[in-house]
Amino acid sequence: MPADAMLRLEILPASRLAQVEQSSVLGGACFSHPACAPHAADQPFLAVDMPLSPGGAAICEVWHSHEPLESGQHGPIHYRLGDTLLFGCLSLDDHAVGAPRDARTPLQGAAETAYQAIFELLDARGYHALLRVWNYFPAINRESHAMERYRQFNIGRQDAFLSHSRSIVDKAPAACALGTAGGGLQIAFLATRADVISVENPRQLSAYHYPSQYGPRSPTFSRAALVRLGGRDMVFISGTASIVGHQTLHHDDVRAQTRECLQNIAAILAEANRQAPEAGFRLETLAYKVYIRQAEDMETVRSEMAHAIGDALSAIFLQADVCRADLLVEIEASGGHALGHD
């Protein structure tokens, strides 16, 4: 890892995870179908049930830091931390977290429990900023208890933010929420002691201001988070879809939706570059994770991204349900950190 790279992302087959230098590993996630628990000693890793391209082997994303690291556990959370960064993950069975109080659904209760634990850990260890969160759970678009499960999750998440006096508007982290093929509620997150700037997209209404047609509580995330770590500006772009204003565009057209996603990411980068003029973020320098609803659309999406970005494209392609039933693809990205092997 370069001496000035406080954070590095490595993508590798799950079969090679045991060969990675363990002292620098913050944590990560492994994707396969069915989920296969990674051999990662005491390090925080999610095992996510999410198919890859047909015939694709299990793959892991691994976050590294050059800081001295230590491991710990707080309730359901396994974590690794250094002086500046903390990576944690947890898995909850949304039918086994105890009887919900009042009218909470099981998933709403699990989301609130998970985020309460996250904020308790961050408060206890002195990490004031939740930087990036990955949320995964099955049947995200299915209705249960008279409400779509994604909307139930949004209520529980926001309740935890409010109960810990965390902003649900201008200081919200970058985040995504995707539907898996199985398992419970799984969350991975990066937190920091550094200052984080939330970035919004001028082409889109901020998600936390969505009208009530999308549920009784708005989603709690920013379009991107900007942070300076070890002298480098880094950007973490939330799951980004074919939405302009607050409306889905290009129904049933995965090619056009992919192009719209990339236009939105370009707009976010322009805003991030405005706030960090020396960063010079560009589409071709980002690391992408691409979630595609239908397996048969994977090559189409891959082709569109390769056409837009070129040979420099660095991406993982996964089959997953997206938070709106009319969305066929969602793309997240990050940049400014080191990428690849030491």
Image (cartoon, rainbow, N blue to C red):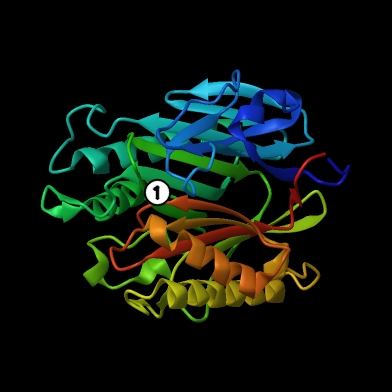
Locate residue 194, reporting x and y percent: 68, 49
Secondary structure, mark 1, is helix
Within the image, what quadrant is residue 311 found in? bottom right
Three-letter code, disc 1: Phe
What is the x, y in percent for residue 305? 58, 68
Q: Is residue 130 visible?
A: yes
Which residue occupies the extreme front position in the image? 55
Depth check: 205 or 248 in front? 248
Residue located at (56% from left, 68% from top) = 303
Q: Where does residue 133 sit, x and y in percent of width and height?
A: 50, 48
Q: Which residue is mark 1?
A: 161
> Residue at position x 51%, y 57% from top?
290
Q: Residue 14, position in %: x, y?
A: 59, 32
Residue 223 visible in this rendered orientation of the protein: no
Residue 60 position by quadrant? top right
Looking at the image, which residue is at 26% across and 47% down? 139
202 relative position to 12: left or right: left
**Number of marks drawn:** 1
Q: Residues within 10 Å of mark 1 (few under 14, many from 20)?
A: some
Quadrant into which the C terminus falls: top right
Is 251 placed left or right of 102 in the picture? Answer: right
**Picture quadrant where residue 88 is located:** top right
State the residue in front, 99 or 310: 310
Instruction: Note whether 1 is above or below 217 in the view shown.
Output: above
Above or below, comparing residue 35 to residue 221 in the picture: above
Residue that protrudes farthest toward the left in the picture: 146
Residue located at (37% from left, 71% from top) = 209
Residue at far right of view: 3
